[in-house]
Image (cartoon, coloured by chain):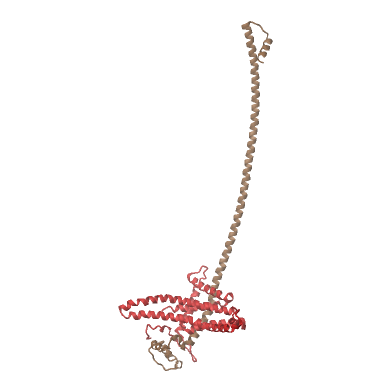
Chain colours: A brown, B red
Amino acid sequence: MFVTQAYAQDGGTTEHLPSEVHGAPETHHQGSIAASEHGTGFPPFDPEFYPSQILWLAITFGVFYWLLKTVIMPRIGGILENRRDRIALDLEAAERMRSDADEAKATYEQELAEARSRAHSIAHGAKETAREDAEKERKRLDTELNARLDEAQIRIAGVKRSALGEVDQIARDVTDTILREVASIEASQDEIAGAVAQTSR
Amino acid sequence: MEHDPTDPIHQFQITRIVPIQIGDWDFSFTNSALFMVLTVAVTTAFLYYTTRGRGLVPSRGQSITELSYEFTANMLRDAAGTAGMKFFPFVFSIFMFVLVANLFGMVPYFFTVTSHLIVTFALALLVIGVVVGYGFYKHGLKWLMVFVPSGVPGYILPLVVTIEIVSFLSRPVSLSVRLFANMLAGHITLKVFAGFVVSMSALGTLGVIGSILPLLMTIALTALEFLVAALQAYVFAVLTCMYLNDAVHPHH
């Protein structure tokens, strides 16, 4: 205790303490140098302050432990828990939104496919109708044209027949005229007609 | 207060601030006690203040708090499993207390609480006391099986058990001396080199030029000491976790 006395004096508070703590009369050294030169005055090994250090460590560490356990750590733990929950919730929401989006996409694609097939069938039907109409129209025109053609041929045949008939008449008239004028032969109409018919055969 | 400014031991000196005497015991409020109180107050205030916003997206300070919280939680879970998590407040208090006390020691004129063997020894005894107390409370006398490793042949068992007991008893010593010696030696070294700068500068121009070397050394050592301060707090906490694992799972 004697050597450590010097340290106590360095603190400048020794004189406030009861003298029985030190067990030695107040002896003034030259401060810490003098004490450390004695070789045993190394403060960390000085038992003088052991009780004080242990007591204050117990008080401060006890209070620290109690504060952390009851106030600080529930607080931090709560924050972390809160964040974990929030992240889980957000992930869940994101997952839900994604499934919604997938569903919407599936519906959309289905509707698109339906619309496409409907459009296809409409186009097909329209094409079919148009084709049928065209066919009908063509047939109608065909028959009409055929009818006109037949009519025309009949007319042509009639014209041709009447023309041929007229040619016979002309031939008979020419023959009659030639016989009368050139040969001065008076032939009957029947004979001329028979002769003309004989040559044109 | 007259003392040599380059004396490396002076920084460890304890002085009474409020003398308290109870019976034969001296429970004075000293500079050591002051820095214990400061350590606790500053740490608690920091942890409380940074979490005030309870931010979903943490602020910078809140990140530090959360990181230290989760760092300690992972450390304990890795060492002692989920069953060890009931000691989380204890380990977190020890880690934060030692860490902040060590870092406070790095501030000039601040007292380093952990540079006194009695403080680190008290903390180590507390750890071992919790281990032994919880071990007996949870497992009864079966907890003593922690000294009997399984799979050891019977004839060397007495030797192994003796070694296990000795190593267990030396834990509080090694735990406390490691932290204490690191802080003490680091601060002494730092002070010695810083002292060189002062005493060489007093020798004139050549001395001032020469003092650049210890100055650079002091700067490097300061960085190293910050590392040591954090590292030793981590080591103390990790070993606490591993010892607590013995209390939770005595069969290894």
Residue B111 in view here: no
Instruction: List the single residue furthest toward the top.
Output: A184
Residue at the image point whose x is 45% and y is 75% from the top: B227
- Which of the pair A73/B157 is nearer the observer? B157
A141 lies left or right of B188: right
Q: How many marks?
A: 0
Q: Residue at x 46, y 78 (%)?
A: B102
Left or right placement of residue B197 versus residue B87 in this view: left
Q: Is residue B170 something one can see in this rendering?
A: yes
Residue B126, percent from left and from top? 53, 83
Q: Is residue B119 above or below residue B81?
A: below
Which image quarter is the N terminus of chain A in?
Answer: bottom left
In this view of the protein, which residue sits in the foreground, B20 or A142? A142
Q: Quadrant of the C terminus of chain A?
A: top right
**What x and y, as percent, mark residue A61?**
51, 81
- Give the residue displayed 32% in from the left and 77% down from the top: B208
The residue sitting at the front extreme is B155
Q: Quadrant of residue B106?
A: bottom left
Say above or below: A184 vs A159.
above
Residue A128 in the image: x percent, y percent? 64, 40
Asked whether, in this view, residue A134 is left or right of residue B32, the answer is right
Question: x, y (%) of residue B65?
Answer: 50, 73
Residue placed farthest to the left in the image? B205
User: Which residue is drawn at the image coordinates 65% and 26% (left, top)?
Assistant: A150
